[in-house]
């Protein structure tokens, strides 16, 4: 749908429902300003035509979040503005017209999914949607991408979460270095219905890397496939600063390689000295620009509240740290402020769990083995982890025979234990697992907070 078609749809809704008081007379005022401007330049054609008003209205919709928020009778605009309100990068993208309207709707088994908007750049696509129908309290959406003819796509990670009926939610696809968002693709969505949501501990958050997910015992109530073509004006390359600066953090050496600044997010590429005694698994930092504006670490995926913090290139020993983007408002030179790091000590990467006795070997301080339950041929493993905003495990596991596996999905959520304490938990389902012990690979073993931040100027 192009901008004129979008205007026509909006105008029809306004005609049917009435114009909000905040917008009363706004189009007429814009048209009068346009007529005055045209007379000053001696243009013969008046801009008070329907086409002129359509352009003025579409411009205000696309460039002004306050205007969108005033459109209380146009729900999807209001909901989009609310969905990105807590995400500085996505909010800035909306304010600068980095939006693609989709407006596709499908219904299956009584459940309707509307894919409303995309906020995107070359390396990230944020999908905004609503779900309704089926008499569920919540929905859990999982998705994967494929080529325009259904062929598999590689080099991306996808994060999704829960949605309330009729409320705008989102999911997010990030593309690795060497890959980018394709011009045309399909997004395939599976929707799980959740009832009595308020009685559960908390809905899990999913993440996967584009691999097919096992069905298990999930209550899949609907599946949808949307064909999408991205607006090429939104997928131009961002700015990349070549850094190549070495810095020492907590006696470990790391190299700041590049800072990639995209419209929806930024990425800091870091590599490490192979002689380090620990792997860096998390970096606490923020960025400031020449004006003193601050950009926090992590890229928030809109309404879901999911914070995307890192991505990795294990083959080349590199990590990408996500952060808010200074693309629209920032001005260099930039300064990186490093406040601490999470470390995975070499030689202590694996924890062994006894699924029958409840014992654990090599469990770091702050971790707690909660329970292991057999569900048919599967095992559900739950571990309490420190509340640092990330999973304590990286989803690799191995059996007693040394065979290694990779989980496709898991949960990281708050849970109230029998002793009354509320903790963050990692929960994983080991499919078709007959053994009594399992080893899980840790994401980190310890955290270091620096007494004084390390400041590095990035040019």
Image (cartoon, rainbow, N blue to C red):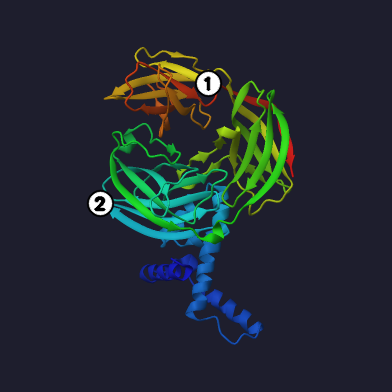
Helix, strand or loop at label 2? It is loop
Q: Which mark is residue 349?
A: 1
Instruction: Give residue 457's position: percent from left, percent from top.
Output: 74, 40
Q: Residue at x 39, y 26 (%)?
A: 416
Q: Quadrant of residue 429?
A: top left
Q: Is residue 176 left or right of residue 243?
A: left
Q: Is residue 26 visible?
A: no
Helix, strand or loop at label 1? It is loop
Q: Which mark is residue 281?
A: none
Instruction: Give residue 7's position: percent from left, percent from top.
Output: 45, 69
Instruction: Tell me: residue 349, above or below residue 256.
Output: above
User: CA–CA distance between discs 1 and 2?
Assistant: 46 Å
Q: Is residue 254 visible?
A: yes
Q: Residue at x 58, y 47 (%)?
A: 265
Q: Residues within 10 Å of mark 1 (few under 14, many from 20)?
A: some
Kindly indicate whether the residue at mark 2 contacts the one at mark 1 (C-beta within 8 angstroms).
Answer: no
Camera-side residue of 421 and 219: 219
Instruction: Tell me: residue 234, above or below residue 241.
Output: below
Q: Residue at x 34, y 48 (%)?
A: 165
Q: Is residue 375 left or right of residue 314?
A: left
Q: Which residue is mark 2?
A: 110
Camera-side residue of 164 and 355: 355
Instruction: Give residue 60's position: percent from left, percent from top.
Output: 53, 66
Which numbered disc flags the more N-terminal residue, 1 or 2?
2
Instruction: Give residue 30's position: percent from left, percent from top.
Output: 55, 74
Which quarter of the image is occupied by the C terminus?
A: top right
> What residue occupies the far bottom of the structure in this picture?
44
Q: Nearer the viewer, mark 1 or mark 2?
A: 1
Which quarter of the image is occupied by the N terminus?
A: bottom left
């Amino acid at each position: 749908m192009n901008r004129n078609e979008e205007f026509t749809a909006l105008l029809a809704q306004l005609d049917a429902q009435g114009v909000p008081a905040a917008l009363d007379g706004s189009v007429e005022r814009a048209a009068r300003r346009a007529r005055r401007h045209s007379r000053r330049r001696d243009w013969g054609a008046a801009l008070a035509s329907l086409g002129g008003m359509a352009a003025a209205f579409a411009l205000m919709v696309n460039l002004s979040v306050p205007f969108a928020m005033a459109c209380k009778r146009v729900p999807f605009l209001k909901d989009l503005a609310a969905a990105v309100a807590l995400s500085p990068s996505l909010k800035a993208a909306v304010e600068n017209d980095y939006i693609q309207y989709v407006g596709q709707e499908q219904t299956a088994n009584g459940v309707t999914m509307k894919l409303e908007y995309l906020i995107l750049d070359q390396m990230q696509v944020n999908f905004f949607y609503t779900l309704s129908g089926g008499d569920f309290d919540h929905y859990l959406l999982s998705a994967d991408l494929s080529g325009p003819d259904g062929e598999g796509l590689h080099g991306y990670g996808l994060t999704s979460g829960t949605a309330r009926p009729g409320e705008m939610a989102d999911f997010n696809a990030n593309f690795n270095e060497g890959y980018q968002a394709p011009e045309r693709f399909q997004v395939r969505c599976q929707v799980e219905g959740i009832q009595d949501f308020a009685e559960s501990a908390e809905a899990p958050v999913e993440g996967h890397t584009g691999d097919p997910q096992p069905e298990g015992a999930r209550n899949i109530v609907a599946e949808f496939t949307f064909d999408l073509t991205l607006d090429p004006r939104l997928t131009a390359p961002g700015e990349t600063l070549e850094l190549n600066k070495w810095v020492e953090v907590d006696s470990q050496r790391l190299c700041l390689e590049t800072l990639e600044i995209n419209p929806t997010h930024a990425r800091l590429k870091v590599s490490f000295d192979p002689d380090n005694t620990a792997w860096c698994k998390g970096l606490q930092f923020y960025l400031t620009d020449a004006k003193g504006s601050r950009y926090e670490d992590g890229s928030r995926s809109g309404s879901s509240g999911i914070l995307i913090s890192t991505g990795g290139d294990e083959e080349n020993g590199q990590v990408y740290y996500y952060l808010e983007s200074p693309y629209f408002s920032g001005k260099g030179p930039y300064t990186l402020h490093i406040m601490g790091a999470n470390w995975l000590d070499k030689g202590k990467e694996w924890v062994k769990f006894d699924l029958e006795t409840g014992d654990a070997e090599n469990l770091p301080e702050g971790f707690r083995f909660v329970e292991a339950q057999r569900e048919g041929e599967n095992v559900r493993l739950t571990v309490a982890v420190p509340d640092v905003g990330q999973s304590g495990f990286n989803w690799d596991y191995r059996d007693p025979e040394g065979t290694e596996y990779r989980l496709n999905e898991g949960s990281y959520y708050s849970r109230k234990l029998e002793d009354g304490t509320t903790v963050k938990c990692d929960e994983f389902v080991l499919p078709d697992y007959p053994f009594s012990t399992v080893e899980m690979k840790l994401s980190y073993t310890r955290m270091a907070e620096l007494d004084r931040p390390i400041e590095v100027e990035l040019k």
